[in-house]
Image (cartoon, grey):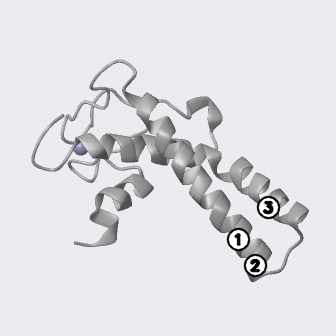
Amino acid sequence: MKFSESQIGLAFRLKCPRCKTGELFLDRNPYHLKNLAKMPKHCANCNLGYFPEAGFYYGAMWISYLVGILMSVIIICVLMFGFHVETKWAFAGFVLFHILFSPYLFKFSRALWLSFYVNQHRDI
Ligand SMILES: [Zn+2]
């Protein structure tokens, strides 16, 4: 199986975890902040429900938190130990990373959270 068709690959591409072609969000661009969390109720291709229960996506916050922490540690270590950047500039890079990538991380976390509960053979 190619990476792009794995559950993580589909989450990166913001695609439906069951049919692999349906869009998870109404607007794919994460920097259109007005539409950041807008998702269709069902997949247009396979009719998978994207909202299995009220508050379902609260769990995605944990993914966002864990990925954010992991990326922060990696960025700070690479900047400080790889490029010998001063600590204050390494933290500036970390802040810049979060400002730039938080909207995408929000969408990625929702996509990955949904993929935990769905596979190609079974509904939620
Ligand atoms: Zn689908």
Q: Quadrant of residue 83?
A: bottom right
Separation of residues labelled 2 and 1 (CA atoms): 6 Å
Mark 3 or mark 2: which comes first in sequence? 2
Q: Residue at x 26, y 37 (%)?
A: 44
- Helix, strand or loop at disc 3? helix
Coordinates of residue 121 in the picture (x, y in percent) = 10, 48
Let me know if residue 27 appears in the view: no
Amino acid carrying mark 1 in the image: Cys
Mark 2 surroundings: few (<14), some (14-19) or many (≥20) residues within 10 A: few
Left or right of 84 in this view: 10: left
Disc 3: which residue: 93
Q: Earlier in the sequence, mark 1 or mark 3?
A: 1
Please tell me which residue is depicted at 11% across the width and 42% down the height of the picture.
122
Type of the residue with mark 2: Phe
Q: Say the numbered circle drawn on residue 81.
A: 2
Q: Find disc 1 in the rendering and name its residue.
A: 77
Residue farthest to the left, as pictured:
121
Instruction: Label 1, secondary structure: give it.
Output: helix
Q: Amino acid at mark 3?
A: Gly
Q: Quadrant of residue 49?
A: top left
Answer yes or no: is residue 55 visible. Answer: yes
Identify which residue, 72 or 9, lies in the foreground: 72
- Residue at image position (56%, 32%) is 35
Q: Position of residue 68 (x, y in %)?
A: 60, 51
Relative to the observer, which residue lies in front, 80 or 52?
80
Q: Are marks 2 and 1 in contact (CB under 8 Å)?
A: yes
- In the depicted structure, whether residue 116 falls above or below residue 56: below
Question: Label 1 neighbourhood size at 10 Å, few (<14), some (14-19), many (20+)?
Answer: some
Nearer-the-camera pick, 110 or 48: 110
